[in-house]
Structures are given as C-alpha cells and as structure tokens.
Image (spheres, helix red, strand yellow):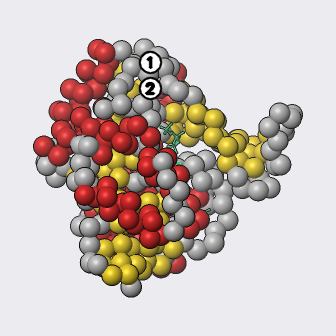
Amino acid sequence: MIVTVTLNPAVDKTIYIRDFMAGEVNKVEYSVVDPGGKGINVSKTVAEFDCDTIALGFLGGENGEYIRQALKDLGIKEKFTEVSKNTRTNIKIVDLKTGDTTDINETGGEVSPEELKEFINIFKRVIKEGDIVVLSGSVPKGIDNNIYRFLTEYGNKTGCKVILDVSSQLLKEGIKGKPYMIKPNLRELEELLNINLDTKEKIVDVCRSIIKEGVELVCVSMGSEGALLIAEDFVLHGKVPKVEVKSTVGAGDSLVAGFAAGLSKGLTIEKAFKQGIAASIVSVTKEGTKAPTYKEVQNVIDEVEVSMLFTSNYYV
Ligand SMILES: Nc1ncnc2c1ncn2[C@@H]1O[C@H](COP(=O)(O)OP(=O)(O)O)[C@@H](O)[C@H]1O
Ligand SMILES: O=P(O)(O)OC[C@H]1O[C@](O)(COP(=O)(O)O)[C@@H](O)[C@@H]1O
C-alpha cells in the first residue's frame, strides 16, 4: 500500500495567460481546476500505475468536499480528517508565451489540537508494515514543524519506507526522523543548507552529509536538468529530453509517485528512479496537475537517460 499524507491540500486553479504582467490587467485564455496538494498528486499518479493507495490528511468546507468527490471519481481511497476550516485554493499562473509558472499559494486554515489528534489516530491505524508512506507538502497553522519527524519515526517503527517531500524548517526537522528518502528540488536544498550549489560535485557532497544523518536516499530534482539520486555508495543522474511544457506544477510529485510505484512493484532503485523521471516528464506536458497515465509514462521511459556518476569513492 502507498499511503500519502497531505496536511495542507489545495484546490489547484491553473490559469493560462499570454504574456502575464504583474501589476497590469491580464486576460485569461483558459483555466483548469484539479484536486491538489503534494500527497494527493502522488496518490493520483500511483493509482494510474494500478498501485493500492490511500490518501490521508485534512479536508474541510466546500473545497474539501470537491477534493473528496474528485478522489472518489478517480477511484482513490481516502481517510481525510474533516476540519472546520475550508481547504485552501492555490492559484498557478502559466504564461503561454514563456512557459513560466507563478505560484500563489494560500497558507491554509488553522487545524485545532482535536483535529490533529484525530488525524494522528487515523495515521497510526492505517499504516502497516511494508507500506510506502509519502509525507508531502507544507502544513497549515496549528501544526508544529516537528510533525514530519514524529510521523517518520512512527512509520520507521512500523516497518514502512518513508519518503519525505517537504521544505525549509519542516525538512530540517523531518530529516531527524531518518526518512528512507527525501526529495528536495535544488532551490529547497540550497535553502536548507544556506549554500549555493552550482556544481554536481557540491550537490553530491552536501547530500552525502545528509545521508550520514540516517537518510538512505536523497533525490534532488533540478527542473529541466533532470534529477540526481544520491546514496551512500552511488550517484545516479537522470537526464530529461526537451519537451513542450504545459505546467510544471506537480512535476516533483510525479517524480516521487513514479519512484514509489516502482518500489512497490519490486523494481530496482535505478529502474524506479527512471520511471519517476519519466512520470515527471509526462506531467509537465499536461495541463494543471493532471496525473500521467502508466501508458504515457512507458511511452517516454526510453527517452530518459540514467547514468552512474559516482560509485564507492571515485567519479566515473
Ligand atoms: N521543463 C522541464 N522539462 C522536462 N522535465 C522537467 C521540466 N521541469 C521539471 N521536469 C521534470 O520534473 C522533475 C521535478 O521538477 P522540479 O521542478 O525539479 O521539482 P518540483 O516540482 O518539486 O519543484 C524534474 O526532475 C524533471 O524530471
Ligand atoms: O504544500 P505546498 O508546499 O504549499 O505545495 C502545494 C502545491 O504543491 C503542488 O502539490 C505541486 O507540487 P510540486 O510542483 O512541487 O510537485 C500543488 O498541487 C499544490 O498547490
């Protein structure tokens, strides 16, 4: 089972504008709406891979109802904790001329201590030995920065593989729980360490120090430059072909999803990584945060070039 946790889901509204200019009147060409939030996007994609998945977290109000119904329509199981505050709406502005995306993310309504307690009880009841647990995204008000450390430690104790895709202080604290894998993008990694990472060697070195803290794998996504997968004794680089970008929103989630789906089906780490990258490539060619299908991913998988950059103690 792939259990996803989205503590701060969102209705993602992606607005397509040609030549977007902040501070000016902009004409919307068209827009799309999707159930979103990082863990939910992962569940949407792994479900396309025929993996058993369940989505957990908080949902409330009209937006919460919309997401619940959308997941039901997609045949995705969920056990979200109902909260009193309406789930947020995140606006994504995609410039049809440049392909650039501007994210306008709401913070998310406050979660009460009782609601948090209920979620934790559900989490403890749902996860089982052998599950892959994906913990992703920001947290709404009312939740401490150490929540992911707690959930990761509980997941480890239960015998799950925990994948953590969060940023800033949440990532710093979460690493202390020793997740199986973290997936920062390059900007998030630089922010975490307050350092400029302008070469692959520098990235590998800092990731190795994170691995020393008890994380097994660090997957650093680098947008159109592909991604690195760093372990104690190897480094893989996945290169991506040039594609027509419709929306980069959810690309990282698709990478995590393709990887998690691969692991749950018993693929090697290298093959799972390749599948994750292929899923992320398909994701950027789709509007909004529409999930890549299994067939679409298999159609591009041979275009992903995965090479070994480093083994044991020398660069190859
Ligand atoms: N412009 C792009 N062209 C091709 N692939 C892309 C592009 N942007 C992102 N990707 C793919 O999506 C992955 C995740 O994107 P990235 O922007 O690094 O993460 P996040 O969405 O978490 O910020 C990348 O590693 C890459 O495989
Ligand atoms: O929880 P956060 O960090 O505020 O991010 C939420 C946003 O991230 C997304 O899940 C997209 O994430 P990625 O582009 O990093 O894959 C959107 O669906 C959502 O609006």
Name the residue at 36% across, 31% down: 145
Badge 2 local density, few (<14 within 10 Å), some, or many (20+)?
some
Badge 2 element: loop
In the image, residue 144 sits, relative to residue 176, either above or below, namely above
- Of 124 and 195, nearer the camera is 195
Badge 1 local density, few (<14 within 10 Å), some, or many (20+)?
some
Residue hosting label 1: 110
Q: What whole-number distance in Å separates the C-alpha atoms at marks 1 and 2?
A: 6 Å
Residue 296 image point, x, y percent: 51, 66
Residue hosting label 2: 140
* Type of amino acid under label 1: Glu
Badge 1 element: loop
Q: Is mark 2 within 8 Å of ligand 2?
A: no
* Type of amino acid under label 2: Pro
In the current view of this chain or complex, which residue is farthest to the front?
A: 195
First of labels 1, 2 by sequence position: 1
Is 128 on the left or on the right of 245, as rendered? left
Residue 134 image point, x, y percent: 32, 46
In the image, residue 59 sits, relative to residue 156, either above or below, namely above
Q: Quadrant of residue 257?
A: bottom left
Q: Quadrant of residue 105?
A: top right
Is 34 on the left or on the right of 17, as rendered? left
In the image, residue 311 sits, relative to residue 269, either above or below, namely below
Residue 178 image point, x, y percent: 23, 48
Is 282 on the left or on the right of 152, as rendered? right
State which image quarter holds ligand 1.
bottom right
Name the residue at 45% across, 65% down: 202
Name the residue at 43% across, 49% down: 193
